Amino acid sequence: MNFDESHFFPGGNRAREQDETNFELKQLAWDLKLGRKLVGDFSAALTGRLLIADAKPSSRLPATPASIAGNNSSMTALAVEPSLSYDSRDNPFRPTRGWFAEGAFTYTDQVDRNQFRYLGYRVEVQRYIPVFHDDRVLLLRGYVAKQDSLDGGSIPFYELNLLDLNNGLRGFDRGRWQDEGALLFNAEWRFPVWQDVQGDIFLDEGQVFNNYKDIGLKQFRYSAGAGLRFVTNRKFGFRIQVAASEDGVLTLIRGDLEFIRRRAAMLGF
């Protein structure tokens, strides 16, 4: 990936919309994932990752300050992530009932220098509840992720946890909220419209944080909206959603399922 203009908002959960800065990022990544079904609905996986990245302030002003960790520098890093998941959903593309839960732990170490070294972990739980009829579904989701630096190392800003239109908080522009920790809740009502078309109404609320003590009820950011999902029991087509937040209104046209975790460096899409 080669981005000439990606967005970073310094200040974590206190960042204002006008605090937007711009950076350039060149990134090449390889991922290898080995998974195995254990027993019942439980599965385990081990993911390995090689990341080569180079970031610098953008030529478009205001530029992300060079003093931000990871900016105006490059890194080659290896990461390993064991994960455990439970999936009792009746269908991965158009579920009507069941649970999905996943926990993962990540260790990332820079191999060309000693500037970046960090741990990360995340836990996600989804519950699908049929209401009135099997084709009318209430989805409830909770997600928490946290990173911590190791042995005097730091975390490059483009690897921080992220909440935005591509990462669960659909009323906010890409790169909007970023910090070491992220807490997110989603509620979504899905109902049939016509054959392979679903409607949805949703509410998202989340916050990023540096330490758990920073979490507070008044710190949550909210977005709400509605849309259409074009999906069958065998494959996902695309979704069109409109979401509103304190920053304004956004229209999303996406060819992927909601709530697919993305690395923060994917924010250029």
Image (cartoon, grey):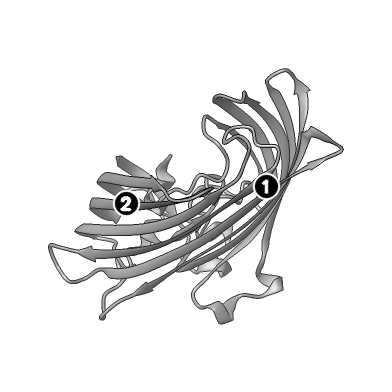
Q: Which mark is residue 47?
A: 2
Q: Residue at x 87, y 38 (%)?
A: 132
Q: Nearer the viewer, residue 220 or 39?
A: 39
Could you say where residue 16 lies in the image, as x and y percent from the top left?
57, 62
Q: Quadrant of residue 112?
A: bottom left
Q: Tag 2, which secondary structure? A: strand
**Which residue is outermost to the left?**
112
**Which residue is outermost to the right?**
132
Amino acid type shown at disc 2 = Thr
Q: Which image quadrant: the N terminus?
A: top left
Dot 2: few (<14), some (14–19), or many (≥20) neighbours within 10 Å?
some
Q: Residue at x 66, y 70 (%)?
A: 219
The span from disc 2 to disc 1 (Cα, nearest Å) is 37 Å
Q: Which image quadrant: the C terminus?
A: top left
Could you say where residue 251 lies in the image, as x and y percent from the top left?
63, 35
- Of mark 2 and mark 1, the one earlier in the sequence is 2
**Nearer the viewer's eye, disc 2 or disc 1?**
2
| Residue 242 in view (yes/no) | yes
Amino acid type shown at disc 1 = Gly
Q: Nearer the viewer, residue 12 or 135?
A: 135
| Residue 58 in view (yes/no) | no
Could you say where residue 100 lies in the image, as x and y percent from the top left?
58, 49
Q: Which mark is residue 248?
A: 1
Q: Residue at x 32, y 46 (%)?
A: 33
Q: Tag 1, which secondary structure? A: strand
